[in-house]
Image: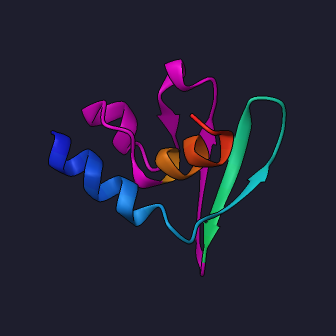
């Protein structure tokens, strides 16, 4: 599980974060686009990886990094 989280942290480099409301953000990298919702306790991302395996996906890692978490 730690290896997957470490891989997601490395993959989060290069994602551009744009807030789309009070509790959400949109992440873009090239032609890819994902939505994440915060607070982090909700564990919601439109890729659904975070909801399925409870390991923050690279999109959530990017958003947490930008928030300083």
Seen at 64% across and 29% down, the residue is 38
Seen at 41% across and 42% down, the residue is 48
| 43 versus 19 height, above or below | above
The residue furthest top is 41
The residue furthest right is 21
Residue 55 image offset from top left, x and y in percent: 30, 36
| Relative depth, front residue between 11 and 31 | 11
Residue 1 image offset from top left, x and y in percent: 15, 39
Is residue 23 found inside the magenta-colored segment of the image? no
User: Which of the 4 quarters of the picture holds residue 14?
Assistant: bottom right
Q: Which residues are magenta?
A: 30-58
User: Which of the 4 quarters of the picture holds residue 32?
Assistant: bottom right
Residue 56 image offset from top left, x and y in percent: 38, 39
The residue furthest bottom is 30
Q: Quadrant of the C terminus?
A: top right
| Relative depth, front residue between 35 and 8 | 8
| 53 versus 15 height, above or below | above
| 29 versus 21 height, above or below | below
**Total count of labels:** 0
User: Which of the 4 quarters of the picture holds residue 28?
Assistant: bottom right
Q: Is residue 43 left or right of residue 64?
A: left
| 26 versus 50 height, above or below | below
Q: Is residue 6 left or right of residue 38?
A: left
Residue 66 image offset from top left, x and y in percent: 65, 48
Is residue 43 found inside the magenta-colored segment of the image? yes
Seen at 67% across and 40% down, the residue is 67
Q: Is residue 27 left or right of residue 3?
A: right
The colour mode here is: rainbow
């Amino acid at each position: 599980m730690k290896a997957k989280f470490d891989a997601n942290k490395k993959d989060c480099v290069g994602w551009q974060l744009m807030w789309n409301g009070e509790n959400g953000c949109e992440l873009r990298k090239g032609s890819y686009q994902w939505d994440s919702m915060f607070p982090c306790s909700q564990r919601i991302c439109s890729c659904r990886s975070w909801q399925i395996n409870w390991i923050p996906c690279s999109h959530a890692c990017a958003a947490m990094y930008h928030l300083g978490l």
